[in-house]
Image: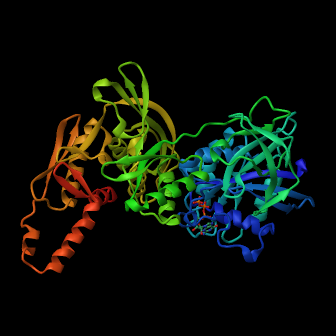
Amino acid sequence: TDVPHTRNFCIIAHVDHGKTTLSDRLLEYTNTVAHRVMTDQHLDSMDLEKERGITIKSHPVTMLYPAKDGISYRLNLMDTPGHVDFSYEVSRSLAACEGAVLLIDAAQGVEAQTVANAHLAFSQNLKVIPVINKIDLPSANLELCLQQLEDILAIPSDEAILASGKAGIGISDILEAVVARVPPPRWTNYPQTRALVFDSLYDSYRGVIAYARVFSGSLKAGDMVELMSNGVRTEVKEVGVFTPKMQKVAELDAGAVGYFVSNIKDPAEIKTGDTVTLSQRRATEMLPGYKEVRPMVFCGLYPVESSDYEKLKAAVGRLRLNDAAFVYQQESSIALGFGFRCGFLGLLHMEIIQERIRREHDVDIISTYPSVVYHVVKHDGVVIEVDNPVNLPDPGTIIEIREPMIKAAIHIPNDAMGDILSLVMEKRGLVDHTDTLDATRVMLSCSLPLNEILVDFNDRLKSVTHGYGSMDYELGEYRAADLVKMEILVNADPVDAFATIVHRDKAEGKGRALCEKLADIIPPQMFKVAIQAAIGGKIIARDNVREMRKDVTSKCYGGDISRKRKLLDKQKEGKKKMKQFGRVSIPSDAFIKVLKTN
Ligand code: GTP
């Protein structure tokens, strides 16, 4: 590598501030991707990403840029996900760079993830190049953006570049700034080979393909390497760069960004953030910042048609291969049959995986209510982790239940303050402090139980602020709370799919709503069937399923035989999908309907 003439940088931004559009423009400008093969958004390859407009996976790309100083520079651009669920992935992509282009939508100004991403970049000592993007918009407010840059991010406004990815304004200024302001690759003098794994991809023929930034030394085919977090050793089969297609090269050396293929077939063995070194001449210290990522949100996923179980199994297995942060294990439920307990980084991650199962694997699925991971302190002093309400031990054996908290930074227009304060209160949150961002906006720093923001917090934030509110959060500590397991009983039998862990104060309201919904959706029965919500045996809400008025089968007696047979066949068909609760049979799609309408 020509270290002095290499620059590794990324683009960071709040969601929708135009990262993909600008990246594409850079590729086009440097002729990395020929104009004609440029699809609208080249870097977002997954369909789903396109639709949601969210970059999920980091795709690095190497560009050659002939700068105004007459020298050709090699620019490695890392794409980064913008959403809170993927902040560890963002931080690993940043760790592979020396600089970051920070995009700010000229019409939106600085938002929650602009700040969070900028702080991540500062904390990794990256050179930050501020770019006010979308200046072609009639609603662009440059003055406000420049002011916010100084006030909120403490970046001198004269460093800002004005640009529009869409209209192609300021593109060469950005590339020149990357060359001039971002330092060449750092830490190249470390005596042994160290490379940072910042992502990976699963290929059914070649196994795991790890994306790596080499800091010192080199990697080439035939090297025996070791992953420093877990001591796994493997042989490098191939190394290459992204053009953006993967292209095999002889060697990746200090400062380079590329990929390597090894003998590793199990994606769980190569973790994002890990350091790769040579087994013969091992480095003694890992590159900084490695962290185990652990799933924070769990739910059960079940096929709507039980015959789709094998298909679902194949689907989760495949998804896991490309996403080490997604975990699953088999489980079964009385109400829903066989399925999987799945763990995700956050709610968005959960939605994306569910969507991909439906779409790419064509399996109709239903999910149970999401749950966080609780810490349960038992009388014998043992602390256990519970991610499924069904597994909560008997209340008599529990001293306390602790729940995960988050620290949220919520950016809102001043006039939404009252509504947001009540929303935070309703979600059992506390506002730690408020900061004025500028004449029209404030930032609230709050602590909230993670569990409470799982379902509708973000939607409500958006609706109360007419789309101008934004939030970023990081995990805080665990805190004890008055939490209880609430069960839903059908004819006195608990239905496992509806068990939840809730705050005692909220149990009754939630219980009543669920009972009502179930009573409404379950078809009329021959006799009275009670639907009850209970906490540890104590009934807190109740409703009844409607009773059937007349006996439908009686009118068949003496009737024509083929009609009778048809009815029997129909009944048989129906029986397969019935779940038995004491004397009561309930079609499983009733449960599915209730879970769907939540
Ligand atoms: P995420 O991947 O979701 O973080 O989005 P992104 O930051 O990559 O934004 P993307 O490039 O997908 O652009 C978001 C929206 O803004 C799209 O509708 C773009 O067409 C539009 N957009 C991007 N750049 C510009 C620009 O310079 N001017 C205008 N007017 N619109 C732009």
Q: Quadrant of residue 429?
A: top left
Q: Position of residue 418 (x, y in %)?
A: 35, 47
Q: Position of residue 162 (x, y in %)?
A: 69, 61
For this orientation, the residue located farthest to the right is 70
Between 139 and 193, the one lying in front of the other is 193
Q: Residue at x 87, y 33 (%)?
A: 191
Horizontal side, residue 383 vs residue 584: left or right = right
For this orientation, the residue located farthest to the top is 380
Between 299 and 34, the one lying in front of the other is 299
Q: Position of residue 232 (x, y in %)?
A: 71, 37
Examine the rendered structure and indicate whether residue 22 appears above or below residue 540: below
Examine the rendered structure and indicate whether residue 263 appears above or below residue 289: below
Q: Residue at x 69, y 34 (%)?
A: 229
Q: Residue at x 19, y 59 (%)?
A: 520
Horizontal side, residue 478 vs residue 317: left or right = left
Residue 116 seen by the camera? no
Horizontal side, residue 369 vs residue 566: left or right = right
How does the figure colour the protein chain or chains?
rainbow
Quadrant of the frame with the C terminus: bottom left
Q: Position of residue 563 (x, y in %)?
A: 17, 79
Image label count: 0
Where on the image, by quarter, is ligand 1?
bottom right
Residue 216 seen by the camera? yes
Q: Residue at x 60, y 58 (%)?
A: 55
